[in-house]
Amino acid sequence: MKKSWKKTLWLPVVLAILCLLAPFSGIQIYNILKSRQYRIYDRTLKKPVVPVKVTIQPGKPFTNSLGMSFVYIPAGKFVMGSPVNELGRDEFEYLHDVIISEGFYLQTTEVSQEQWIAVMEINPSKIIGYDHPVEQVSWFDCQQFIQRLNQMEGDTNYRLPTEAEWEYACRAGTTTAFYSGHISFTGKDCDSNLDRVGWYRGNSGNTSHSAAQKQPNVWGLYDMHGNVWEWCQDWYEHWYGKFQSDPVPDPKGPTKGIFKIYVKSVHPHFSMYFSPAG
């Protein structure tokens, strides 16, 4: 008994069509969800607000009206980048001297989901936990969050740190791959020095975790290694620092570009090692 070729091909053809439609449908659903999110953000930014004045003593830690804790990072000088023989090093992490000429304040943890909801009225995170870091936010989402936070606290000048400021704060005077010491890879994606200070592939269970569960650096900053990615203010520049012979004062990156800079690693299956330079 012969089967028609048309009958034998119908299933592969249907499967091929479904494979083509699935990504398109996923994109459409994503766009619908993001559109709803942006409408909520726009409505939130337009709401009137009575600013709450926050008192800050120069050089002292402070907590803002939302319970976000900040520490003062003093001015100083450091070597940005990583040595060529460092395990896990990115080829563009050129060593160069950087001067941070003015001190600044940095939040001691990532922005939590609870804090994001208090400002933007919606939680975009995929892994829900109100004391977990907020995720699934773009650089532009962060700018809207900052805009609203500045509205809520009047003349308080919140912004994202530059990449140089972030790495300087993460290192906190150290020169090793982690602020807890050198890379001490022991096999099966485990590193004893990294275990003490960060969530990564070897200990996270491929999920984010509540903030401030690991040891902070000497400036009181938590989760500077691992847990989730963090946005910086700069545009990305792959040759950053390559051609610098003199110390660079307060680098802010290029004036334009295609990509913004993010630092650290999100769910640690992306990367085993993430030094401050990466």
Image (cartoon, rainbow, N blue to C red):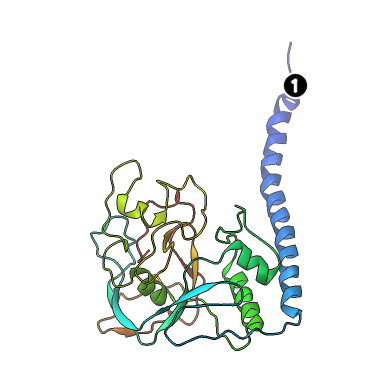
- Category of crowding for the residue at label 1, using alpha-carbon neighbours closer than 10 angstroms: few (below 14), some (14–19), many (at least 20): few
Residue 237 image offset from top left, x and y in percent = 42, 73
Q: How many marks?
A: 1
Q: Nearer the viewer, residue 259 or 214?
A: 214
Q: Quadrant of the N terminus?
A: top right
Query: Which one is nearer the viewer's eye here, 229 or 27?
Result: 229
Residue 98 appears in the rendering: no
Residue 14, compared with residue 224, is above or below; it is above
Q: Could one spot residue 208 in this view of the protein?
A: yes
Q: Which quadrant of the figure contains the C terminus?
A: bottom left
Q: In the displayed structure, does residue 54 sit left or right of residue 262?
A: right
Helix, strand or loop status at disc 1: loop
Q: Nearer the viewer, residue 120 or 141?
A: 120
Residue 23 point in image, percent of width and height: 66, 48
Q: Which residue is mark 1?
A: 4
Residue most extreme to the top = 1
User: Is 262 on the left or on the right of 185, as rendered?
Assistant: right
Looking at the rendering, which quadrant does residue 146 occupy? bottom right
Give me the residue at 45% from left, 56% from top. Answer: 213
Query: What residue is shown at x 41% (from left), y 52% (from top)?
Result: 271
The answer to whether 144 appears left or right of 179 in the picture is right
Image coordinates of residue 220 in percent, x first then y, are 40, 69
Query: Residue 87, position in %: x, y?
Result: 28, 55
Q: Amino acid at mark 1?
A: Ser
Quarter location, residue 43: bottom right
Residue depicted at x 73% and y 30%: 10
